[in-house]
Image: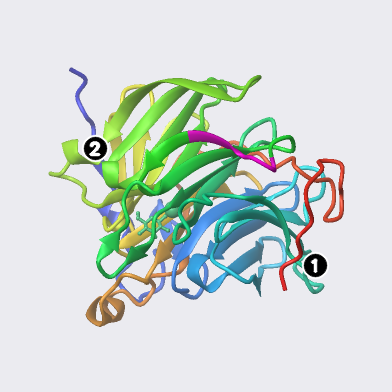
Amino acid sequence: MATTVIALLALVVPIWGLPPLAPTQYPGVYQLTEPVDHAECPSWDYRNNILYYVNIHEGQVYRYDYDQGNLAYITLDGEVAPVIPSSRDPNLLIVGLDRSVAAVEWDGVSDPSETRILAALAPDFPTSRVNDGKADKQGRLWIGTMGYEGPDGLTPDEGILYQVTCNNLDSPLIEIAPINISNGLAWNAANDKFFYIDTPSGQVVQYSYNDETGEISDRKVVFDVNNHTEHIVGGPDGMTIDEDDNLWVALYGGGAIIKVDSSNGDLLEIVPLPALDVTSAIWGGPDLDILYVTTSRVSLTDEQKLEQPAAGAVFAIVGLGTKGRPTFEVDILGSIDDESCGAKIALRS
Ligand code: BGC
Ligand code: CA
């Protein structure tokens, strides 16, 4: 059996409320933004050095311009996740909205366009909502849903992972169902493996992936949080992958992001963060060597909020000694009023 080598990077933990570590003490965790309720689904547009993320329940789409150093947001009419720019127009954003896939045009300066609904999701589960999603190399959108999550817990088995393309907007393809909380997604460098997380399972699973057809097959578990309870707690949430095909998995309820070898499931590193609920991560920066990590404060008690004033912020982790690969953009529409996909236009009031 392979031995698990764990580097617990305890030194990187900034003390609550104190400035980040000196640049010599790499890796360093920096707080990039003010906290919001539930920051999630970061994506990086390497064409313009833009970090996008959402504040799900408030319907907010955030845009951080790395070169200008400014942050702007728009508010959509519904719960929003994820946000992914389009391949043919960087200002055309594809978002999940309540139980739909939608498009909005926004350059971070001008007023956004009206939101155009492209496809309906999960019609049988009217209290469910969209959660994480990503584009594959062909520009298909993989987007998941989850059942209603309230004070009494989660409505189980109401999540679905869809594949949405220009050709199936009337009836998006169901890839995996039923699931509980559709979360992290990643593809390896060779683009023949797809990694996926249904949070309550505690597992990261792997499928063989056929990029030409978009088909997944041969499911197997690569990592299970429940096998590492001496070191980590929480549920695996969003994830990203680095240039060496190691997975970086956010631990919701675990106060950390972990590095996992996707080839054998070894837990390689644990990077603690000053927020209990770590939601997702993406590689960004001009050299793709900054790990941007989103966090949440929505489930914290009042006491926990006082102890974790930065919970809900986006953090930038530098000096991790590795970097990411550019992620993919969605290729569904060329412009907001492009009809070539045969999408039905339904403008939200
Ligand atoms: C969801 C949360 C959920 C969490 C669990 C997130 O992606 O948005 O509602 O509690 O996953 O890990
Ligand atoms: Ca998530």
| Res 205 quadrant in image | top left
Work out which quarter of the rendered image holds the C terminus and state it: bottom right
Q: Which residue is drawn at 84% across and 46% down?
A: 334
Which one is closest to the eye, mark 1 or mark 2? Answer: 1
Report if the CB atoms under discs 1 and 2 are less than 8 Å apart.
no
Name the residue located 42 percent from the left edge and 70 percent from the top edge.
Answer: 312
The residue singled out by tag 1 in the image is: 113
Please tell me the numbered disc located at residue 36.
none
Crowd around label 2: few <14 · some 14–19 · many ≥20 (10 Å): some
Residue drawn at point x = 87 percent, y = 49 percent: 338
Disc 1 residue type?
Ser
The reply, left or right, for residue 64 in relation to residue 2 is right
Q: Which of 288 and 245 is in front in this view?
A: 245
Percent across and percent down for residue 332 are 75, 42
Q: Taking 115 as reference, is 254 above or below it?
A: above
At which x and y percent is residue 197?
39, 40
Which residue, given by chain and number where applicable, does mark 2 sit on? Answer: 6
Q: What stretch is highlighted in magenta?
A: 169-175
